[in-house]
Image: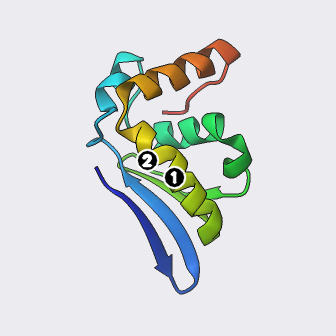
């Protein structure tokens, strides 16, 4: 499981390597692909207050959020326990689907 905060020339980003997470089986079981786009959608649904302050640059193999160090640290604290918890992923996906949210994975 790889979740990393980066600082390149004053630009901060948080990345998660997709496809090798403990919660991937729960993502697949819910009918989704465990890729960067799925995790981007999950963040946008589960933590919209944080997500609205970030820019995203995800791809198939990686979730990537760009923003202030403070916002990214807050996101890391929120998402870290979820990416290692199949039950948390199932609960968030179920809430998202009930609300009509569509993942773009």
Residue 86 horizontal/vertical position (percent): 36, 27
63 shown above or below 94: below
Question: Looking at the image, do the residues carrying marks 1 and 2 touch, with CB atoms under 8 Å apart?
Answer: yes
50 shown above or below 41: below
Q: Nearer the viewer, residue 105 or 65?
A: 65
Residue at horizontal 57%, vertical 37%?
A: 41
Give residue 80's mark: 2
Residue 97 horizontal/vertical position (percent): 60, 16
Q: Is residue 49 left or right of residue 33?
A: right
Q: Is residue 78 left or right of residue 54?
A: left
Residue at horizontal 64%, vertical 58%?
A: 55
- Determine the residue located farthest toward the top in the rendered image: 98
Residue 23 horizontal/vertical position (percent): 34, 32
Q: Quadrant of residue 6?
A: bottom left
Q: Quadrant of residue 103?
A: top right
Residue at horizontal 64%, vertical 12%?
A: 98
Residue 7 horizontal/vertical position (percent): 49, 78
Q: Which residue is mark 1?
A: 77
Give residue 86's mark: none
Residue at horizontal 49%, vertical 81%?
A: 8
């Amino acid at each position: 499981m790889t979740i990393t905060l980066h600082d390149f020339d004053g630009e901060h980003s948080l990345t998660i390597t997709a496809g090798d997470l403990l919660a991937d089986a729960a993502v697949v079981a819910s009918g989704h692909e465990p890729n960067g786009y799925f995790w981007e959608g999950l963040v946008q649904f589960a933590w919209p207050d944080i997500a609205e302050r970030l820019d995203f640059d995800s791809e198939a193999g990686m979730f990537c959020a760009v923003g202030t160090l403070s916002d990214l640290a807050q996101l890391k604290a929120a998402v870290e326990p979820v990416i290692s918890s199949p039950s948390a992923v199932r609960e968030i996906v179920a809430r998202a689907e009930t609300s009509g949210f569509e993942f773009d994975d």
